[in-house]
């Protein structure tokens, strides 16, 4: 018997068309109704830093694009856990957005015994608006002229160098300890309550070196600090004469750089997630955003949505392996 294809009746075809149209209306409705009130971008740091500056640029752009009010609300504390916990418990409708360094989602799950959120199940990553390329900076009084000279000093047993960070488990701490592992050095860690007081002591030669990005740029350009290297994988556009650590013979440290991450609660409607992701990526492509990123010693990115979760998961895995070797005690 010859096979005869099934022919749908006119009624069946009509129902199928109606269903498809209804689905499209529902999808569109989710995004068209958004936002219906103030959108709050919750940051993990106090006002004034680079995360805050980029978040405010995104907030301004989203307000213009969505024709609504978008505000930035700093909720600093516990290495970003305070802000992340707040957003994870917010209604999953796109009106509450987390803006953080990737350390909040990549380092904190390894650093805290009982983090107040689950980095995978509580959040949907919607944008990676910038990548950090950390800079190794020293006080000129240290008397080293290159990364190779610095590494020799770091490895020396005759004088133990000290370094400052924004706190235990921060990206600056992780990067410094991984450098020590790669070189065989044993510097002394001086943790501070934020990057600003650490920078103040570096400028006063109270500590010898640190890893930083945005905060150090003006002081490098004014000659108050000396930039010896950037982590990489490539040189910074704003500091083209500063080599990468790879050029100095130190490889495999790129995972310590981190990203700026924008995320919403996991159950946020797909239409809203896609809308916010698209708008933020467009905002970060503007000339104003590109200049801001370059001036702060960050790197512009345009990461496809399909790759974002995998990038953070990969960084979290490598961070976990590094922390296990460093043996930082959990909180």
Image (cartoon, rainbow, N blue to C red):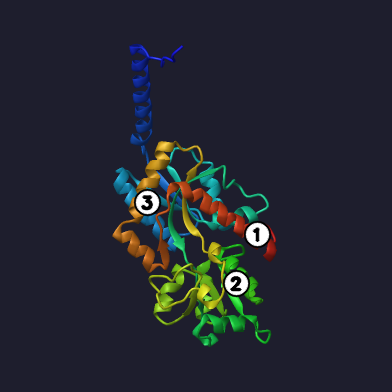
Residue in the picture at 38% in, 31% down? 27
**Residue underneath mark 2:** 179
Please indicate whether residue 188 sits to the left or right of residue 219 in the image. right
**Percent of width and height locating residue 33:** 35, 34
**Residue underneath mark 3:** 281
Sooner in the amino-acid sequence: mark 2 or mark 3: 2
Sooner in the amino-acid sequence: mark 3 or mark 1: 3
**Residue underneath mark 1:** 321
Residue in the picture at 34% in, 59% down? 289
Give the SS element for disc 1: helix
Residue in the picture at 44% in, 68% down? 214
Separation of residues labelled 2 and 3 (CA atoms): 33 Å
Whether residue 97 is visible to the viewer of this picture, yes or no, is yes
**Percent of width and height locating residue 251:** 56, 70
For the residues labelled 2 and 1, say whether their Cβ atoms are less than 8 Å apart: no
Sooner in the amino-acid sequence: mark 2 or mark 1: 2
Separation of residues labelled 3 and 1 (CA atoms): 31 Å
Foreground residue among 205 and 157: 157
Foreground residue among 263 and 89: 263
Whether residue 83 is visible to the viewer of this picture, yes or no, is no
């Amino acid at each position: 018997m010859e096979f005869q294809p099934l022919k749908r009746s006119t009624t069946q075809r009509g129902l199928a068309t109606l269903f498809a149209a209804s689905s499209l209306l529902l999808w569109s409705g989710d995004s068209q109704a958004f936002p219906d009130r103030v959108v709050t971008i919750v940051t993990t740091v106090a006002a004034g830093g680079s995360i805050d500056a980029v978040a405010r640029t995104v907030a301004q752009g989203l307000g213009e694009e969505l024709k609504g009010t978008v505000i930035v609300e700093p909720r600093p504390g516990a290495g970003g856990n305070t802000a992340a916990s707040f957003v994870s418990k917010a209604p999953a409708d796109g009106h509450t957005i987390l803006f953080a360094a990737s350390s909040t989602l990549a380092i904190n799950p390894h650093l805290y015994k009982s983090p107040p959120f689950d980095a995978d199940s509580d959040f949907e990553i919607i944008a990676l608006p910038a990548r950090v390329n950390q800079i190794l900076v020293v006080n000129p009084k240290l008397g080293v002229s290159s990364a190779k000279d610095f590494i020799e000093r770091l490895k020396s047993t005759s004088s133990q160098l000290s370094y400052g960070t924004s706190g235990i488990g921060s990206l600056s701490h992780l990067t410094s300890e991984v450098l020590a592992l790669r070189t065989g050095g044993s510097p002394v860690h001086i943790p501070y309550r934020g990057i600003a007081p650490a920078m103040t002591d570096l400028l006063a030669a109270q500590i010898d070196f640190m890893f930083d990005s945005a905060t150090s740029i003006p002081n490098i350009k004014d000659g108050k600090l000396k930039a010896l290297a950037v982590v990489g994988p490539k040189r910074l556009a704003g500091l083209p004469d500063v080599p990468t650590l790879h050029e100095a013979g130190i490889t495999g440290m790129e995972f310590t750089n981190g990203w700026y991450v924008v995320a919403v609660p996991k159950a946020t409607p797909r239409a809203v997630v896609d809308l916010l992701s698209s708008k933020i990526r467009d905002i970060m492509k503007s000339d104003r955003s590109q200049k801001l990123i370059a001036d702060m010693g960050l790197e512009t990115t345009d990461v496809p949505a399909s790759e974002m979760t995998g990038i953070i998961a990969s960084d979290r895995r490598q961070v976990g392996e590094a922390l296990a070797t460093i043996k930082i005690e959990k909180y």
